[in-house]
Image (tube, coloured by chain):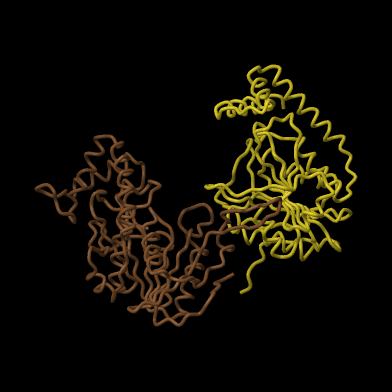
């Protein structure tokens, strides 16, 4: 009996070669899905395949979010004109190796993918008024050298702290490297009090890199508008809530807040942004 | 995916000692103590990526240098008495949701371990874990033993400080060994290996603490070394147990007096030398377990 394939490809995209971009639906400030959805929409991405959920997700029921039942989806989109393959998925709960192999199998064997990019947000104690940095972790020195022409921080040092585990992005990058597919993990530090909301500035930072790298000619007018709107809301929060203003001002002066103050600021911002929606 | 052997030593009908983490890592520490004392050499490993999520990433100067997985290593040692193969798993392949492995992944990894046992013509496999028991931490833990073959029962009965499941009050020879330390017995049976699981007792009120229990590991080491006919220095385990005794005493003092009074009765369970005229009754034991369960909000005594 042959083993059932964990993925379905409805139609084979016509790529000579392509680049794979991966984002996970649960990400700090919705960075990954925000970038992926923007690219898919802007570039006319068409869904051409998926990974079946049964081997990778606990299907004992459904998670309800904002009164709506959620179901794990793992979809592939092709942006033919730009030679981009986009993968958007919930993070699998188990059989990670098989899941990540499935992504690479589809990208490599059906789309001729020659490189892999992952997107992820990471938490920072810096305030939202500080510029967003785009950090890159490359799979090799050659890849790092290629990235030299872009505005990226390429000198990250990191070891997983005790009690924590590496990200799926690191796992995927490692697996791609084993297949000799060059890859890059892209990270943007997100102000901690925006982690459960959105960070439009961070989204633009990643999109700007893809725009340059793939020659996408994106008109950032709509994102700039979103950034302006979010900054305006945060400015309003500071005006109306002196405590919030004080916390952010201290962060802007490179001062640390206590754990309790961090939590208070996060809660205040979350509530304020929710009410403003 | 599979087993990668670094070398192929000639071994004479070796005995395999295999273990994975569990409660207080009693079995893992016991087997690793023997492996270390005998200076066993690395033999090979199970390729981990298909079973485990990575445990550490190392990024240097913007380049992903290494991704480290939980180790699953085989070791070997030739001794005058018998040749040994060790398998020590750093984690159980539990799919990220539980501590203990189950289902397809557990079955596959158990079979890979036994593939190595088969390759080297192992005549027996020992696994080791913990037995959560109504005992007091001042007592010497016994070792519970389960075999996968009725013919081994007579042999196990001769082991010192060891009880069979049938001798445990209220169990009538039945129970459940959770995780790979238990599953391996079953898979070994299916594949025709004789196997014995030895489990060191841990007091019920210590099972949830994030501490090892070297006292029980020592009991397991004593059983294993005697049955293998080898000698191993256990002084490290003694001093480790001594150090931890202080932490355990501290924890014990924090337990509310009424629950502690119940726990004190565990000092007089039937298998220990009673310090009072009459040992604990079955009714007392039931009440103690009920009170402990209520206090610690944990499940009742079990084994893994």
Q: Position of residue A103 (x, y in %)?
A: 71, 59
On screen, residue A214 versus residue B281, left or right, reads right
Residue at horizontal 69%, vertical 53%? A74
Residue at horizontal 27%, vertical 43%? B290
- Which chain wears yellow? A
User: Which quadrant holds residue A19?
Assistant: bottom right
Chain B colour is: brown
On screen, residue B23 versus residue B97, left or right, reads left
Q: Position of residue B166 (x, y in %)?
A: 25, 64
Residue at horizontal 44%, vertical 61%? B20
Q: Position of residue A236 (x, y in %)?
A: 73, 20
Q: Position of residue B242 (x, y in %)?
A: 30, 50
Query: Which one is in front, B50 or A52?
Result: B50
**Residue extending farthest left:** B277
Relative to B297, residue B232 above or below: below
User: Which quadrant holds residue A101?
Assistant: bottom right
What is the tally of numbered marks visible in this picture?
0
Query: Which one is in front, B62 or A62?
Result: B62
Q: Specify the quadrant that holds the C terminus of chain A.
A: top right
């Amino acid at each position: 009996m042959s083993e059932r394939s964990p993925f379905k490809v409805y139609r084979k995209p016509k790529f000579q070669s392509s680049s794979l971009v991966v984002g996970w639906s649960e990400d700090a400030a919705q960075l990954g899905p925000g970038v992926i959805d923007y690219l898919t929409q802007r570039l006319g991405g068409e869904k051409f395949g998926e990974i079946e959920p049964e081997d990778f997700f606990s299907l004992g029921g459904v998670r309800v979010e904002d009164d709506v039942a959620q179901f794990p989806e793992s979809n592939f989109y092709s942006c033919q004109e730009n030679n981009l393959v986009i993968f958007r998925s919930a993070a699998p709960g188990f059989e990670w190796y098989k899941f990540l192999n499935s992504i690479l199998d589809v990208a490599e064997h059906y789309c001729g993918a020659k490189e892999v990019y992952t997107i992820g947000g990471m938490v920072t104690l810096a305030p939202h008024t500080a510029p967003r940095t785009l950090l890159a972790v490359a799979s090799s020195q050659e890849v790092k050298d290629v990235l030299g022409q872009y505005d990226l921080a390429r000198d990250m040092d990191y070891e997983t702290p005790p009690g924590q585990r590496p990200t799926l992005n690191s796992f995927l990058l490692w697996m791609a490297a084993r297949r000799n597919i060059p890859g890059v993990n892209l990270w943007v530090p997100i102000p901690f009090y925006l982690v459960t909301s959105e960070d439009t500035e961070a989204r633009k930072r990643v999109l700007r890199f893809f725009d340059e790298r793939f020659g996408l000619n994106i008109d950032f007018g709509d994102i700039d508008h979103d950034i302006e709107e979010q900054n305006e809301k945060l400015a309003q929060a500071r005006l109306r809530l002196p405590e919030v203003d004080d916390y952010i001002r201290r962060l802007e002066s490179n001062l640390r807040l206590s754990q309790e103050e961090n939590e208070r600021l996060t809660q205040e911002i979350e509530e304020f942004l929710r009410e403003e929606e | 995916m599979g087993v990668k052997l670094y070398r192929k030593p000639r071994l004479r009908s070796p005995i395999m000692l295999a273990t994975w983490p569990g409660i207080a890592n009693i079995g893992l520490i016991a087997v690793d103590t023997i492996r270390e004392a005998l200076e066993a050499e690395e033999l090979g490993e199970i390729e981990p990526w298909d079973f485990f999520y990575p445990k550490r990433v190392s990024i240097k100067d913007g380049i992903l240098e290494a991704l480290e997985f939980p180790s699953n290593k085989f070791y070997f040692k030739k001794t005058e008495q018998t040749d040994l193969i060790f398998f020590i798993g750093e984690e159980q392949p539990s799919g990220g949701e539980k501590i203990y492995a189950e289902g397809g992944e557990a079955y596959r990894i158990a079979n890979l371990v036994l593939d190595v046992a088969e390759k080297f013509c192992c005549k027996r496999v020992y696994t080791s874990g913990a037995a959560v028991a109504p005992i007091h931490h001042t007592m010497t833990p016994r070792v519970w033993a389960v075999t996968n073959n009725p013919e081994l029962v007579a042999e196990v009965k001769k082991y010192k400080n060891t009880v069979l499941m049938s001798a445990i009050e209220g169990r009538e020879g039945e129970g459940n060994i959770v995780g790979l330390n238990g599953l391996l017995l079953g898979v070994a049976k299916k594949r025709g290996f004789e196997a014995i699981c030895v489990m060191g007792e841990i007091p019920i009120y210590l099972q949830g603490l994030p501490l090892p229990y070297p006292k029980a590991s020592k009991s397991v080491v004593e059983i294993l070394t005697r049955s293998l006919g080898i000698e191993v220095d256990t002084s490290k385990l003694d001093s480790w147990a001594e150090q931890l005794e202080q932490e355990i005493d501290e924890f014990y003092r924090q337990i509310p007096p009424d629950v502690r009074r119940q726990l004190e009765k565990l000092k007089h369970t039937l298998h220990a030398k009673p310090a009072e005229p009459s040992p604990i009754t079955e009714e007392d034991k039931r009440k103690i377990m009920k009170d402990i369960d209520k206090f610690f909000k944990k499940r009742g005594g079990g084994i893994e």
